[in-house]
Image (tube, rainbow, N blue to C red):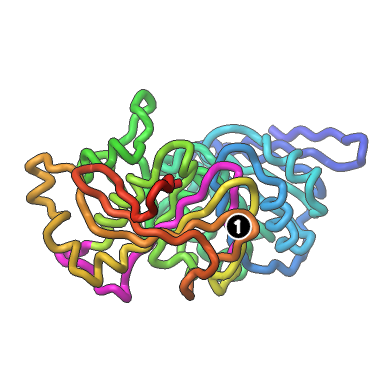
Amino acid sequence: MIGSRLLFCMVLSLSVSALGQTGTAYRYFRLGSTANATAISKPGFALMGGGADLDEAFKWLCERAGGGDLLVLRATGKDDYNSYIQKLCHLNSVATIVIPDRGAAEDPFVAQAIGHAAALFISGGDQANYINFWQGTPVQTALNDAIKRGVPIGGTSAGLAVLGEYAYTAQGDKPDDRDLDGKLAMADPYGPRITISHNFLEIPVLKGIITDTHFAKRDRMGRLLVFLARLNVQDGKPLAPEQAIRGIGIEEGTALLLDTNGQGKVVGKGAAYLVDPTPALNNAQFTDPFNKASVELESPFSLDYFDVYKVTPGGKFNLNEPLKGVNHYALSVHAGQIHTNQAGSAIY
């Protein structure tokens, strides 16, 4: 079914719900020109922590679209972003495509829509849907092809969670479960809720990175530390320090805007955190305090120690060089409790 109406500003609004070759429906909503524009995109990555949408981050993403067509991807929901982004940005069109299962992800139109986009944005929701529905389908291939072409991409909340090389998939969570906060993760670091995917998206600057969202409000430092402890032990051995997998946590109402060299800035009202396990790897701390045998005996998580760099709005971020002029402290975990070396200082 295709319906259209002429808006007062002479912008066409197009809504399509189509049964693909698999018999499964995707939904497509578009504001603006019905014809795709030829645009020169500028690569970049907008890592948004969730909560209220941040105008500055979306404007930054739009500017890199070169006046072309921006596409929002989601697994549930409607076209809420279309009018919001259209009011902020000067673009040929803003469209949303809802891809609710693997059948819809196999439809040729979906990959074609991604292939035409000059900028991409993955909305919030449930990252388990993105992994379950899109990984191993033409959607994943089209997204990675777009990244290789230099198309800028952003994501918020669940959309941010899948941008790194590693992603917490929330596969073990159920709708009636409590949110997996730091306390729960540290109490059961080898539990079924700690589920991590690899290489859903292949963004070179985020290689060796796992991201986390709603960071301070939902008390997620502890779970990010658990993710890093798990990831930095592979094949039963700790990684070499130069191979360390690091974490980025971003607060609500905050975004980290990165270029392809891993340099960028923090915008919004909160902070972004770079969490680095290199000190523990250098001191062989991963060999005894965190091993599966002890966890199976129901010992809570313990590990020394992690470097944390907290970057506030306006601060510069660099993934390839030591961060200077930012709040830097160390964290350790003893029996499931986080400790900091900053006297009288809160972790967040």
For the point 64% across and 49% down, the residue is: 268
Residue 29 visible in the picture:
yes
Magenta run includes residue 248: yes
Q: Residue at x 67, y 45 (%)?
A: 54
Residue name at image x 58 percent, y 61 percent: 45
Q: Secondary structure at mark 1?
A: strand
The three-letter amino acid code for the residue at tag 1 is: Val
- Span highlighted in magenta in the image: 233-258
Relative to residue 158, is residue 234 depicted above or below? below
Residue position for label 1: 266
How many marks are shown on the rendered structure? 1
Residue 113 vertical position relative to residue 186 in the rendered view, above or below: below
Dot 1 alpha-carbon crowd within 10 angstroms: few under 14, some 14 to 19, many 20 or more:
many
- Residue 225 is situated, as x and y percent measured from the top left of the image, at 32, 52
Q: Image check: 145 left or right of 59? A: left
Observer-nearest residue: 17 or 129? Answer: 129
Q: Quadrant of residue 287?
A: bottom left
Residue that lies at the very extreme toward the front in this rendered image: 343
Q: Is residue 271 left or right of residue 176?
A: right
Residue 184 position in % (x across, y down): 28, 36
The residue closer to the viewer here, 211 or 153, is 211
